[in-house]
Image: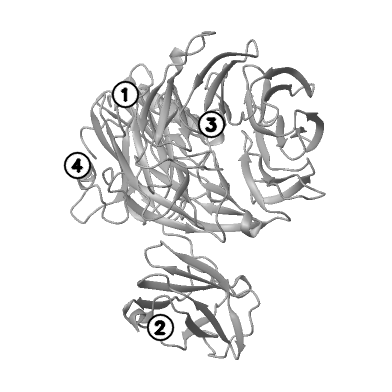
Amino acid sequence: MDSNTNIDSNTPRRAGRNGAARWLWLAAVLGVGLAACLLVLRYRKHAPESVHHWRAVREGVALELEMEALDPAQREGPLREGQDVTFRLRLADAESGTPYTRVWPAAWMGGRTPDEHGGLADCRAKVKSYLEDGLFRGNELDLNTYQILVLNQDASISVVDPRFSFGGSRLLAMALLRSPGADWALTGDQSRLFVSMPGSSRVALVDTLTFRVERELELSAPPYRVALQPDEGYLWVGGGAEPSESAGIDVISVRPEPRLVRHLPTGQGPHTLAFTDDSRFAFVANAGAGTVSVIDVRTLSIVQTVKTGRAPTGLAYSATAGAVYVTDAVDGMITVIDPQRGTIRASIAAEPGVGPIGFERRGRLAFVLNPESSSLQIIDAASNRIIQSGKMEQGPDQLGFTDTHAYVRHSGSETVLMVPLDGVGTPGASIPVVDFPAGQHPLGKSALPAGILPAPGASAVLVANPADQVIYYYQEGMAAPMGSFSTHGHTPLALQVLDRTLRESSPGVYETTARLKGHGVQDVAMLVNSPQLVHCFEVEVAPALNQTPPAAAPRVDLLTDTQNVPVGKPVHVRVRLRHPTTEAPWQELPDLTVLTYLASGLWHERQQAAPQGDGVYAVDFVPPKPGVYYVAFEAQSAGLSLHGSQRVLVKASAEEMTQ
């Protein structure tokens, strides 16, 4: 044991051995032992066995580490490789118990090398290597970073690691979708991402630890808008402008497995969604019907349909006002609805063209953008009056907020305007603005509302510029972005942040989630700058349980030559599917689909395979550029998955294009 670490102990001291002292000593031992047993029994009765707990005291600081499997079904027994685990670190003064707040600890988890024995010197060396190396040795978990998810114009989601210097970010992974995404919603624990795909009338569920599409939900109409209510009980899915007798929204339960539970015919879309903070009511703006539907979430029933104008488009709920605010682009009105009564509380005259609306985090001031007049208006929810107005750059179309600023994106300009929140709120006063350039080209029109969002752990924002194919990082107080992240050839439409850092969930308690890698003895190494200390907790991770072997999937045998195929001309790929043990041709598969993609991830195509009899299937594709292509196969009926199947390698060359 490390001599510099003080571990709490209930071991009694030994007393004298002669006469009465011996009996006093024995009685004390028995008394302490009995009390200790009662305490242990009481602790075991009340403490959850599913939480793995470690405690140490170093430099006067009490450190506690808890690890708990996210899946309740996996919480009994040891920690195991492959489990998704919550890491919970508590820091407090060892004497007073006062929590250490806002200290931002750094932590990593990794196995030991043969020359490491677990002492303080090894711990310090390990932390030093983590800080210096940046790239780890393979099985280490970094609990201090965030990743940027990029919804691309094509049918993909990029995962970008921003740590590899601004301008030199690394593409970590790509999630390939069945068709391009239109909107998305991330769960609070950041383990699941829901993506609407109108081109295939589906909603995809992406696992954010593996970045794979876990499953898809097929809907009767193309989905566009998706939103999670605050308590994440339901995912709400709105449709587009396509005419339909049953136009409305779909309600999907999120846990344990997503499933469609209700379709509500609210009226013609496009739809916009908002909720009360307590998830009691949901609001749906039906632009094609000129109404807003007020929905009781407990009964999933429409309790009121409010006529608000000819084209209600923007929705924002204010907990401070206890009302939802609706903008109408055609009538130029802003309607305030009382959700409890389902009645109009106020109507505010603005200008035709009003659209996006959002409240700063106090919920007092509403910012309303007008892309047609290139203006911003500010509403005081206390009086339901427009108190300030100002001109913006060309086509303001998106809002973003930090604790100190409101950010305005413009479709016709590369300039992002910032409004200091401490400088607004005075009726009749001008709106102060500061600007910075977010790229070289105008940001362009976007139907997605998430092109600007706060960066974790700093007064900074991330801005996606589709024309530049770049994400810019801007820190408040600077004259220009500090740097940029490459999107690796994809056109970014919207951003999400996966915050993998240890975040303070309550005073002195820091949490994050991660998937355990490797097994055996590992160290959870932590570093705190103030007070300065380094400590490693020794953690035993059991091997993953042997899973039930999956049913034998078909073997893929290539029947055509795919080496040095010409770019720009159809490539005919034929394969035969065989049983892996009997070698017999596999029976016909009606659901065999083929994903063809460039190795760099910059192009892909999905299509149905054509059966030709005797287990043979064919697919044609045209390689758009030179490079290495992979052809992967998927058939759920045969247990054949894209990630588990054998892939066909195709090498495309430009040499034959000159013939």
Numbered disc 1: secondary structure: loop
Helix, strand or loop under label 2: loop
* Pointer 2 local density, CA inside 10 Å: few below 14, some 14–19, many at least 20: some
Question: Where residue 564 is drawn, which disc sits there?
Answer: none
Is 174 or 102 nearer to us in this picture? 174
State the separation of the CA atoms marked 2 and 4: 48 Å
Element assignment for label 3: helix
Circles 1 and 3: CB distance less than 8 Å?
Answer: no
At x 23% / y 27%, what residue is drawn?
532
* Residue 625 drawn above or below residue 615: above
**Residue beneath disc 3:** 42
- The span from disc 1 to disc 4 (Cα, nearest Å) is 32 Å
Query: Looking at the image, is 92 positioned above or below residue 467?
Result: above
Chain-order first, disc 1 or disc 3: 3
Mark 1 → mark 3, Cα distance in angstroms: 55 Å
**Residue 128 badge:** 4
Mark yes or no: residue 541 visible.
yes
Residue at 70%, 55% in the rendered image: 219
CA neighbours of label 4 inside 10 A, class few (<14), some (14 to 19), many (20+): few
Residue type at tag 2? Thr
Mark 3 to mark 4 CA distance (whole Å) = 41 Å
Say which residue appears at 30% left-offset and 44% top-offset.
Answer: 163
Checking the image for residue 562, the label placed there is: 2
Tag 1 residue: 477
